[in-house]
Amino acid sequence: MAGGILGLACVYAGLRAGRRRRTIDDTPTSKTHGVFIGDVELKGRAESAEPLTSYLAGKECVWYSWSIDEHWRRIVHETYTDEKGNVRTRTRVESGTITVASGGEQQPFHLRDDTGAVLVRPAGADVEAATVLSVTCGVGHPMYFGKGPGGAVPNSTFQRTFHESAIAVSQSLYVMGRARERSDRVAAEIAEDKRAQLYLISVRDESAISRGYAWGYWLWVLFGLALLLGGWAVYEHDQGWPDTQRWQWYLAWSAVYLGLLAGGWVWMVHNSIVGLRQRVRQGWANLEVQLKRRHDLLTQLVAVVQGLAAHEQEVQETLAALRAQAAIEARSASAEGLAGIAPRLVALREHYPRLVAQEGFLELQHELSSTEQRIALARSYYNDIATAYNTRLLVLPDRWAAALSGLRSEPLLVASDFERAAVEVLS
């Protein structure tokens, strides 16, 4: 019974690893400038204006964890009764390690790529950091008491292992998580979300992470089968069943296990494809948001710039008239006449503040470029996630699970689909 329960637990763990692998493989990599609300995959370098300093290695980083393990060894004398009933004594050696100190620290940091940066909050994430220090030493080493505690554990060999892992500044990272809107400004951030399938920050690349989950899937599945058959072997041995009956039960339990595994696989594939379809729809919604932003924002900005241009033209005409009057009055050498211009210049400055039409045009140009870039990123993300979804519907064996659920492909965006009402900009 225990073997069967543990086998089923291993099946669940294997399917969980498999689904995480599919999530990583199916999610296209986004640019930091194009991060939208929802599940995202990012690649970039860690940045921090005020980085942390790791405890053991003294390395500038945004996340670190350290531990100090002390080795111990002892000799144990024990008595036992042999097969003949004689009481005997034997000696054995036990050894091991015990953690005598540990700690760590983390801070929000920015992940930067070639388009910009996005804030990442590592709290609650599965962090795979790089090893920055691993030293085993004795009492003569300066780290032994310099970084470790002053006392010793019972039966200590006076050997300690110092280990520290960290995410260093400028470290290349892979981030899979859920984006949300920041509370302090209009921008996105990556943070822990209970609804997210995976929140991972890793120094490994995407292919290595995917392979790790693939190995985890098969190891859990095979380990579960071994537990199930091993538990049954112990049970039937106690019952003293003949070999023929024994192998029949082995085959029966193996068939049940594989049947449950197949059902679990269909469940995993169905849920992953449905989740992928939802991200396709989310990608389309994000694109619509960017198109709406372009229409609303740029229409108002163009109107403002047009007003500034008209205002500047009026002020320039006024200034030209004043210059002409000043030239006439200068030729007449009339001091009173020149003094009469000053109040008009003061009134002009009070009623017409600093001319900003030029800055307005520059802002319009910047917003045009930024908005079109956002739309291009949103369109690219949608096509990437839709392609991944459509591919899942075609490849075997995923195609069979998709057919059972009646899932259909999603269209890709082409130029004619992408056109919307254009915003007329100043010519």
Image: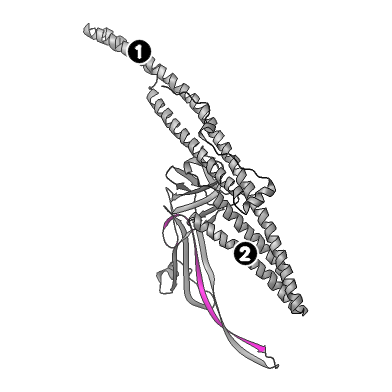
How busy is the neighbourhood of tag 1: few (under 14 within 10 Å), some, or many (20 plus)?
some
In the picture, measured across the screen, residue 317 lies left or right of residue 197, that is left
User: Could one spot residue 2 in this view of the protein?
Assistant: no
Q: Main secondary structure of the magenta part?
A: strand
How far across and how far down the image is residue 298, in percent?
Answer: 48, 27
- The residue identified by callout 1 is 318
In the rendered image of this protein, does residue 378 appear above or below residue 399? above
How far across and how far down the image is residue 35, in percent?
Answer: 51, 42
Q: Amino acid at mark 2?
A: Trp
Q: Amino acid at mark 1?
A: Thr
- The residue identified by callout 2 is 220
Q: Quadrant of residue 312?
A: top left
Q: Which residues are magenta?
A: 55-80
Where disc 1 sits, the SS reads helix
In the picture, measured across the screen, residue 410 lies left or right of residue 241, that is left
User: 31 or 274, which is in the foreground?
Assistant: 274
Residues marked 1 and 2 touching at CB (< 8 Å): no
Q: Is residue 68 magenta?
A: yes
User: 333 or 239, which is in the foreground?
Assistant: 239
How far across and how far down the image is residue 250, in percent?
Answer: 72, 71
Q: Which mark is residue 136?
A: none
Where disc 2 sits, the SS reads helix
User: Could one spot residue 215 in this view of the protein?
Assistant: yes
Q: Quadrant of residue 249?
A: bottom right
How busy is the neighbourhood of tag 2: few (under 14 within 10 Å), some, or many (20 plus)?
many
Closer to the eye: label 1 or 2: 2
